[in-house]
Image (spheres, rainbow, N blue to C red):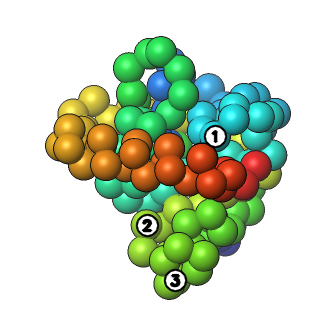
Amino acid sequence: MSDLGPDDGPFYHGTRAALRTGELIKLGRHSNFGQGHRANFAYFTATMDAATWGAELALGGGPGRIYIVEPTGPFEDDPNLTDKKYPGNPTRSYRTREPLRVTGEVADWQPHPPEALQAMRDNLAKLKRQGVEAING
């Protein structure tokens, strides 16, 4: 366990935003998911699979990207994915109210198979029709 939270990483952030090493991912920008509301948290994960979903499902027109990030302050389990949907935190997904520092980019990540990606998009569309927001601000 780190001094900041429940995991030592390394940590990743999947997005479509073009970021540079050293840049901070700050709160208050539009969310990558859901209705695109202003984000109250920065989200990140310690698994490439979860980061890949983030890169593939993020809003925006650019290519999916996965960045290596480090939290600059305390962080906690992401309640959108832990205990509500999965017991514990198997995706090792977290959120913080502090910025994330970009320390690098993963250039060689592998996308999910097209049928898995379409199934995830269909499920998210179904949840949206039911009024369930994918990310809780």
Please name the residue shown 50% across and 34% down the image.
58
Q: Spatial distance from mark 3 to mark 2, Cα to Cα?
A: 9 Å
Q: Spatial distance from mark 3 to mark 1, Cα to Cα?
A: 23 Å
Please name the residue shown 53% across and 62% down the image.
93
Q: Quadrant of residue 105?
A: top left
Crowdedness near tag 2: few (<14), some (14–19) or many (≥20) residues, C-alpha within 10 Å: some
- Image quarter where the N terminus lies is bottom right
How many dots with numbers? Answer: 3
Left or right side of 66 for 27: right
Image x and y of residue 122, in percent: 40, 45
Please name the residue shown 55% across and 66% down the image.
81
Q: Which mark is residue 13?
A: none
Q: Which mark is residue 88?
A: 3
Crowdedness near tag 1: few (<14), some (14–19) or many (≥20) residues, C-alpha within 10 Å: some
Residue 98 in view: no
Q: Nearer the viewer, mark 2 or mark 1?
A: 1
- Disc nearer the start of the sequence (2/1): 1
Q: Nearer the viewer, mark 3 or mark 1?
A: 1
Q: Nearer the viewer, residue 9 or 90?
A: 90
Image x and y of residue 50, in percent: 40, 54
Left or right side of 74 for 121: left
Q: Identify residue type, mark 2.
A: Thr
Image x and y of residue 35, in percent: 69, 35
SS for dot 3? loop
Please name the residue shown 79% across and 34% down the image.
38
Residue 57 in view: yes
Disc 2 designates what residue?
91
Q: Which mark is residue 34?
A: 1
Left or right side of 121 for 108: left
Q: Quadrant of residue 114?
A: top left
